[in-house]
Image: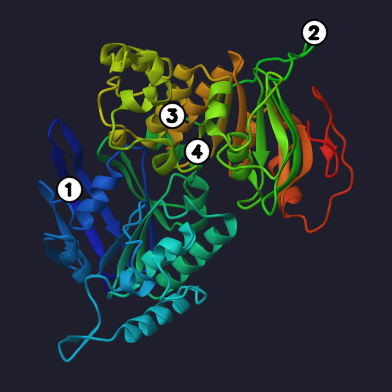
Amino acid sequence: MAPEPPLLTMSGITKSFPGVRALDGVDLHVQAGEVHCLLGQNGAGKSTLIKVLAGAHQPDDGTIVWRGDEVTLRSPIAAMRLGVATIYQELDLVEGLSVAENVYLGHEPTAAGFVVRGRDARASTAALLRRLGHSEIDPARLVGDLSAAQQQIVSMARALSHEVRLIVMDEPSAALDPDEVDNLFRIVGDLTADGVAVVYISHRLEEIRRIGDRVTVLKDGRAVAVGLPAKETPTREVIALMTGRNVEYVFPERAPRDQDGSPLPDPVLVVQGLARDGEFAPLDLELRPGEIVGLAGLVGSGRSEILETIYGARRPTGGQVRVDGRVLRPGSVRAAVRAGLGLAPEERKAQGLLMLESVTRNVSVSSMSRFSYGGWLDRTKEREAARTATRELSLRPDNPSVPVRTLSGGNQQKAVLARWLLRGCRVLLLDEPTRGVDVGARAELYTVIRRLADEGLAVLLVSSEVPEVLGLADRVLVLREGRVVHTAPAHDLDEHRVLDLVLASSTPGPTLTKGPHGPATTEGSPAS
């Protein structure tokens, strides 16, 4: 008996834009009921390929065969009618409409040629949400009132409202906590068990081994590997294919501190009893020039809230923040910035960047007074200062006039860092600094962050990836349910110990570890 043909075969797909060959003869073969992982660095061609598959781009050359028949996908509607749904990283939902209205937007249920009543659409939506394991989402609720994870479920429900046979998921776990990721993988397993194919795109290589069946790797618009077995292919090999070189998760060496017995520098940032009711308990923290301190904990443990409160974006219910001995006005971002604090937020595109503006304007926006004279802006000096700051961080392309939205995730993050370098900040608050950043760019960011610290910048770091915290930080505060439950030098911790602490159901017993900043602290002790 002849084997069943692939559900999807894309052969020799070529696509060019002015001055750029985005795809150069790419192949992709997807079987029904499999999770096919599409990997590659930013700019490798992943987005262009999935837009060709979604009907949003027309290929210049190549063929698409669907269930044995050659097809032409002239529009997203044509792709959807064929059975191909795409869930982009930037969800295309209408926040002012209800869940049910979003699920059936553009293909409202009809009977006898008429659009059916809203309650019928809500009932159908509720059935889809139950299938996805999220019956708690009210079909009548506004999408804008939902969490990021719930909005992603709505996007999946919309895909399933069609007769879908293949779903493309672009970075679906980027904004999810571990429990939500587990639920996502359960949903993917249920879909593939029903014969639905999933094309899964992620920068988190550990997910590929966990969920993937096969892997296709793109580099510079070419497929350098097609259909590798996901679980049997070593991660090091995948990284080498993506980057063209052997890149590992190797962190830059920490500069030796306090080795000659000389006293440590005075803290630049001192946090005393800082708290926000319902978010995190009173926190004590000292941060010295040249030091990186990491906050480790689950999503919802108060990590981001601590950074935003220190920065003045949230008003504390108790405690104070001092920079160089001066108390900052609580709840004032302006006071924090003037004192030398800078924040690279978790939601880089929504909160950290002016996406339609140039790199120059994004870098200079916090230092505009330096380039303004009598109400006039000296654009030449603004551009020169931005170019100097971006070159220090090797931001690519070396052209600060391009819109920041055209940059890769890693280079967008460098633009945020360049803003604070230009401002001359002394304390850098980093919230998920490598989210949405590919493997090669991560290594560059790690080197940049460590170099900035070695040059005297104080860094407070939040990351959901425990190896990242342990690899970058000099000292780590472990958070659980808004409380610091353990503090220790990073070299005295490992991933298993941190996970044990954040997942523990009861307060751990005392654990003291001698380090360069004195003994580690446990819950109930000041984390200084």
- The amino acid at mark 4 is Pro
> Of the residues shown, which amino acid type is indicated by label 2?
Ser
Locate the N terminus and report the quarter of the image it occupies: bottom left
Whether residue 441 is visible here, answered yes or no, is yes
Determine contact: label 4, label 3, CB under 8 Å. no
Mark found first going from the N terminus, 2 or 3: 2
How many numbered circles are shown?
4
Q: Is residue 245 visible?
A: no
Q: How far apart are marks 1 and 3 (CA)?
A: 35 Å
- The label shown at residue 13 is 1
- Residue type, mark 3 in image: Val
Sequence order check, earlier mark of 2 and 4: 2
Q: Which residue: 80% across, 8% down?
A: 262
Q: Where is residue 512 in the image (x, y as percent from the top left)?
A: 88, 36
Towards the viewer: 352 or 514: 352
Picture coordinates of residue 40, whole percent (x, y): 36, 41
Q: Residue 416 carries which label?
A: 3
Q: In which quarter of the image is the C terminus?
A: top right
Identify whether 200 is placed above or below 238.
Answer: below
Vertical comparison of 11 with 166: above or below? above
The residue carrying mark 2 is: 262
- Mark 4 — residue? 345
Q: What kind of element bears circle 2?
A: loop
Residue at 29%, 32% (x, y): give it: 357
Q: Nearer the viewer, residue 93 or 168?
A: 93
